[in-house]
C-alpha cells in the first residue's frame, strides 16, 4: 500500500492554519467579509490535512485484480483490464499520473505517493502488464 508523503500534508496543514488565522485577523480588525471567506477556505484545507494525517483514508493499493484509490469520501477501484495506460502529465508546476481508461473516462491520481510521477506511472504500467488479462 502506497501512502502520500506526510511531510507534504503537514506543510499544507501549517500553511492552511496560518492563512485561516490571517482570515480571522482580517475580519476582526476590519470587519471585511473577505476575512470570513479566507477563514472558511483555508480552514477546510486544514481540516482535510488533519484527516489525511490521522485517518489513513488516502492511499493507493495495488492488488492482482485492481488498483484501489483511497479518498476523503470512499475508495474507488479500477480493474487492470479497464485501464489502457498510466501517463505522467504536467499541470502547471505539478506532474500527476493520468489513468487512461478504456471507454474514455480518464482520471488523475490525487497524489504521487512519495514518488515522482514518472516512477509511479512506470510502476503502475508494470503491474498492469503483469495482471491485466488479454490486454
Image: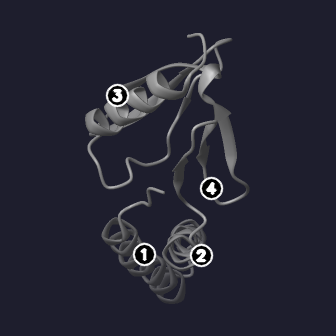
Q: Secondary structure at mark 3?
A: strand
The reply to whether residue 91 is visible in this rendering is no
Q: CA distance from mark 1 to mark 4?
A: 17 Å
Q: How many marks?
A: 4
| x and y percentages locating residue 8 in the rendered image | 33, 65
Q: Which residue is mark 4?
A: 71
Q: Secondary structure at mark 2?
A: helix
Q: Which residue is mark 1?
A: 13
Q: Which residue is mark 3?
A: 88
Q: Nearer the viewer, residue 15 or 40?
A: 15
Choose mark 2 or mark 1, whichever is in front: 2
- First in residue order: circle 3 vs circle 1: 1
- Quick one: quadrant of the C terminus? top right
Q: How is the image coloured?
A: one colour
- The reply to whether the C-beta atoms of the residues labelled 3 and 1 are less than 8 Å apart is no
Q: Which residue is mark 2?
A: 55
Q: Secondary structure at mark 4?
A: loop
- First in residue order: circle 3 vs circle 4: 4
| x and y percentages locating residue 126 in the rendered image | 38, 28
The reply to whether residue 23 is visible in this rendering is yes
Amino acid at each position: 500500500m502506497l501512502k502520500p508523503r506526510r511531510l507534504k500534508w503537514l506543510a499544507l496543514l501549517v500553511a492552511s492554519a496560518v492563512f485561516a488565522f490571517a482570515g480571522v485577523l482580517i475580519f476582526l480588525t476590519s470587519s471585511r467579509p473577505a476575512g470570513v471567506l479566507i477563514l472558511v477556505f483555508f480552514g477546510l484545507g486544514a481540516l482535510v490535512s488533519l484527516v489525511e494525517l490521522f485517518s489513513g483514508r488516502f492511499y493507493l493499493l495495488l492488488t492482482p485484480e485492481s488498483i484501489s484509490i483511497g479518498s476523503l469520501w470512499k475508495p474507488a477501484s479500477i480493474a487492470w483490464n479497464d485501464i489502457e495506460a498510466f501517463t505522467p502529465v504536467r499541470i502547471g508546476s505539478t506532474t500527476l499520473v493520468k489513468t487512461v481508461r478504456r471507454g474514455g473516462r480518464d482520471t488523475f491520481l490525487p497524489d504521487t505517493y512519495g514518488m515522482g510521477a514518472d516512477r509511479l506511472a512506470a510502476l503502475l504500467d508494470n503491474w498492469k502488464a503483469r495482471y491485466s488479462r488479454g490486454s
